[in-house]
Amino acid sequence: MAPIEAHVRLHSGRYLDPWYNRLRDAYVQTMADLGVTTARGGIGKLRQRNRSQVAYYEPWSALKRETWRPDIRAAALANVRVSMHRKLTKTAAAADLYPVAIGTDAIAYPSSGPSLLDVLPYTDEGKPAPGTFRLGISPGMVKHQGTQTVLWAEQQFEEAGGVFNLTNLIKNDPTAGEGGGE
């Protein structure tokens, strides 16, 4: 069966670059104005869940928004996941370092110290090892979301019975901030 209708672009190029640059610059500037040196990504802006605000028989207003693009969101998330797996592999090769837990957007690594700098592999010149995770505030870079001890993790496993993702607990624990929870 032949397609009946198609929406195609007449030019080639990186379609999401202008959106990415604008969103990145806005987040970085807003966070800097608030005194925060890290920013969160904006992929979630391409999707909005109902959260029981609209009855099942009424039209859902989010579907009318120009930013309602779950297809682009899915493609962007797939790209991020592939990139994350490549960086995991490069980090393992560069530093013989493997994660103990992987979440949607968080990775827990064993470390000799509480700082993110204790985990990220660097070259002899002090630069990030090629292809590994890079520290920064721009999308695609990593930030420290928390530090906890092995004893803390063991306690979580004992309390929860091992049915959870450790990265989510560290990320959401208020005592696990920069240098916290040592």
Image (tube, rainbow, N blue to C red):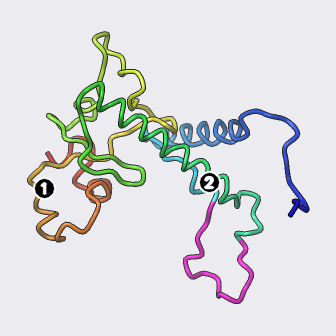
Q: Is residue 51 left or right of residue 142?
A: right
Looking at the image, which is closer to me, 23 or 30? 23
State the residue position of label 1.
Answer: 152
Tell me which amino acid carries mark 2.
Arg
Give the residue drawn at x 43%, y 35%.
86
- Residue 54 image offset from top left, x and y in percent: 64, 83
Classify residue 94 by image quadrant: top left
Residue at the image position 71 percent from the left and 37 percent from the top = 18
Residue 69: x, y in percent? Answer: 69, 58
Splitting the image into 4 quarters, where does residue 17 fall? Answer: top right
The magenta segment: 47-61
Q: Position of residue 95 (x, y in %)?
A: 25, 27
* Location of mark 2 (residue): 73
Asked whether, in this view, residue 88 is left or right of residue 155, the answer is right
Q: Is residue 162 above or below residue 37?
A: below
Residue name at image x 22 percent, y 54 percent: 175
Quadrant of the snapshot with the N terminus: bottom right
Which of pointers 2 and 1 lies earlier in the amino acid sequence?
2
